[in-house]
Image (cartoon, rainbow, N blue to C red):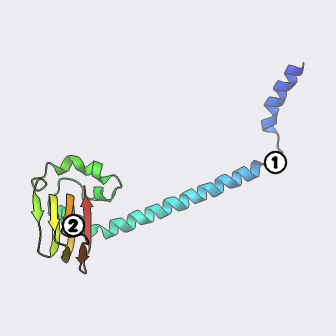
């Protein structure tokens, strides 16, 4: 008899209307959902802003005929996504030494730069290694530079 009442209690307890923390749990999950949706909206806004700022670099990379979608460089794991394409590019095994002011797209294995670098225009650098002469490198100019060292 006692066993039957135990089973009946187990079956009816979840159906009872008076649960002391039922509304609190529902409120917490709504607040949690709100926090998660706010965080997702913030991340989405940041992504859109980065994509807008990357438009000119995207055009420059497309004009340089890179064999991958330039938007891949906006992802956090861009190195893994781009790696299979890099060594297929004829520019990548090269070692470049630039002394003139930088402007445009620079693709190379290694890019050697002087201690003081001047920007003559918007610059995109996609290289494995960037080496500056001296210990304190300075990059000056009224243009954007995007460095993607792999």
The answer to whether residue 127 of the structure is visible from this angle is no
Between the residue at mark 1 and the residue at mark 2, the CA separation in whole angstroms equals 61 Å
Q: Which residue is drawn at 16% across and 73% down?
A: 102
Q: Residue at x 44, y 66 (%)?
A: 45
The image position of residue 30, as x and y in percent, is: 65, 55
> Marks 1 and 2: which is nearer the front?
2
The answer to whether residue 143 of the structure is visible from this angle is yes
Would you place residue 1 above or below residue 125 in this image?
above
Residue that lies at the very extreme toward the right in this rendered image: 1
Among the 4 quarters of the image, the one containing residue 13: top right
Residue that lies at the very extreme toward the front in this rendered image: 135
The image position of residue 32, as x and y in percent, is: 62, 55
Instruction: Report whether 135 appears left or right of 96.
Output: right
Among the 4 quarters of the image, the one containing residue 141: bottom left
Tell me if mark 2 has few (under 14), some (14-19) or many (20+) residues whose alpha carbon lies within 10 angstroms of its own: many
**Element at label 2:** strand
The image position of residue 12, as x and y in percent, is: 81, 33
The image position of residue 52, as x and y in percent, is: 33, 69
Would you place residue 4 above or below residue 47 in this image?
above
Give the number of the disc on residue 46. none
Quarter that holds the C terminus: bottom left
Would you place residue 103 above or below residue 28 in this image?
below
N-term-proximal mark, 1 vs 2: 1
Residue that lies at the very extreme toward the bottom in this rendered image: 142
Quarter that holds the N terminus: top right
**Element at label 1:** loop
Residue of label 2: 124
Tell me if mark 1 has few (under 14), some (14-19) or many (20+) residues whose alpha carbon lies within 10 angstroms of its own: few
Q: Which residue is drawn at 49% across and 62% down?
A: 41
Residue that lies at the very extreme toward the top in this rendered image: 1
Residue of label 1: 20
Q: Residue at x 64, y 58 (%)?
A: 31
């Amino acid at each position: 008899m006692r066993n039957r009442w135990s089973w009946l209690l187990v079956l009816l307890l979840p159906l009872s209307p008076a649960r002391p923390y039922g509304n609190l749990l529902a409120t917490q999950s709504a607040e949690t959902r709100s926090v998660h949706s706010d965080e997702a909206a913030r991340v989405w806004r940041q992504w859109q802003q980065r994509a807008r700022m990357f438009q000119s670099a995207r055009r420059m990379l497309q004009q340089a005929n890179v064999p991958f979608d330039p938007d891949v460089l906006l992802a956090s794991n861009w190195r893994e996504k781009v790696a299979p394409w890099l060594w297929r590019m004829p520019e990548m095994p090269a070692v470049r030494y630039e002394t003139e002011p930088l402007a445009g797209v620079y693709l190379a294995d290694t890019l050697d730069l002087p201690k003081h670098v001047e920007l003559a225009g918007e610059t995109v650098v996609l290289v494995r290694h960037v080496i500056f002469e001296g210990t304190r490198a300075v990059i000056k100019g009224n243009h954007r530079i995007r460095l993607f060292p792999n």
